[in-house]
Image (cartoon, rainbow, N blue to C red):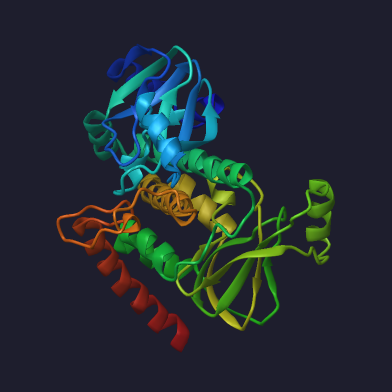
Amino acid sequence: MTEVLLKELTKTDIDWMIGTGHQREIAAGTILIEEGKVANFLYILLNGILKVTIFQPDSNPLARAFAAIEGNEILGREIARLSSGEVVGEIPFVDTRLTATTIQAVEKSLVMSIPQHKLVEKLQQDVGFASRFYRAITIMLSDKIQNTINQLGRSNLAQGQPLKDVLFVLGELHDSDIDWIMACGTRQKIPANTTLIHERGTVDALYIILDGVMSLSIVENERNPLARAFAAIEGGEVFGREIARLSKGEIIGETPFIDGRLPSATVKTIEESIVLSIDRQQMTAKLQQDVGFASRFYRAIAILLSQRLQGMLSRLGYGRRVYSQGLSLAESAEYDDELNDSVLDGVAIAGKRFDWMVGRLIII
């Protein structure tokens, strides 16, 4: 991950982080971020190794007893190890939910910690820095999602959540941004059984599904990626296993705008669908020329990816939820995947925006 920061941030950005943060040596076993707790710092790992664990309820009373005797409060499953250059504690900047993982030092390590409130001020005051920072975070989150899938197995991880994608994105954009998307976007009717995006193939546009249902699938056998790429270019059928259904309000094709990587899944229409497509070249030019739009767009995509990652871990059953422990729902209780009032207000506004978009585009 070191190259991500060095590539995406300028020397001035890095100088600010060095001047604002402070180096801290931590002993093996130190918990930097605990699942279900608020992270007050953004951490950059300078040296050492950290491990990422997710809570895994253990119904075995003997295992719990030994854990208690040994003073081990973390009954979790390790899903990743982090090395020099990795960034942790980014969730508060892109997601209101509490973190779903615990970050702990495996050996004596050196980290740089940047206070959350100072970073928030910088993001609000310096739109150029915000654009570069959120782009870097989107790249890191995308890598974390892929690593989590690889670590936990390619199971049915990405269940569709209708409207959620577009609501989080539209909630971050300005009216002028949406006007531009409407003006540059093209309404397309896609026949059933049409492959819109090929795994490892090029992507020509960012798509917002306005109506219909699509399938998200991956190739199960790890065949030569070059062979898959040529099959995609030639329009050949690459058979895969469906891992999700996508419907109204979902966003697809955002991958190339993160760091130019090729898509890791195939998207195919199940029934006739309607999409709003924003040409890749036009979107790329807009991101390069309008730093304010770029800042809001990358923040929106970072929120989207964070939601997908957090939701993935929750759906796997590792989230520490009050209601999964047999307790009743209550207004005073906090739940891991619960959205706060400010986010719900933004989602409500975004919902009205999306209904307006759909009304205009479907009728045309």
Q: Farthest residue to the front: give it.
A: 62
Residue 30, position as x, y percentages in the image:
37, 20
Q: Is residue 217 visible?
A: yes
Q: Farthest residue to the left: give it.
A: 332
At x 53%, y 51%, the residue is 284
Considering the image in quadrants, where does the N terminus appear? top right
Q: Nearer the viewer, residue 173 or 304?
A: 304
At x 30%, y 19%, the residue is 21
Left or right of 62 in this view: 116: left
Residue 248, position as x, y percentages in the image:
47, 75
Residue 64, position as x, y percentages in the image:
40, 37
Q: Farthest residue to the bottom: give it.
A: 363
- Answer above or below: position of 160 versus 120: below
- Answer above or below: position of 237 versus 34: below
Total numbered circles:
0
Residue 36, position as x, y percentages in the image:
31, 42
Q: Is residue 13 visible?
A: no
Q: Nearer the viewer, residue 122 or 144?
A: 144
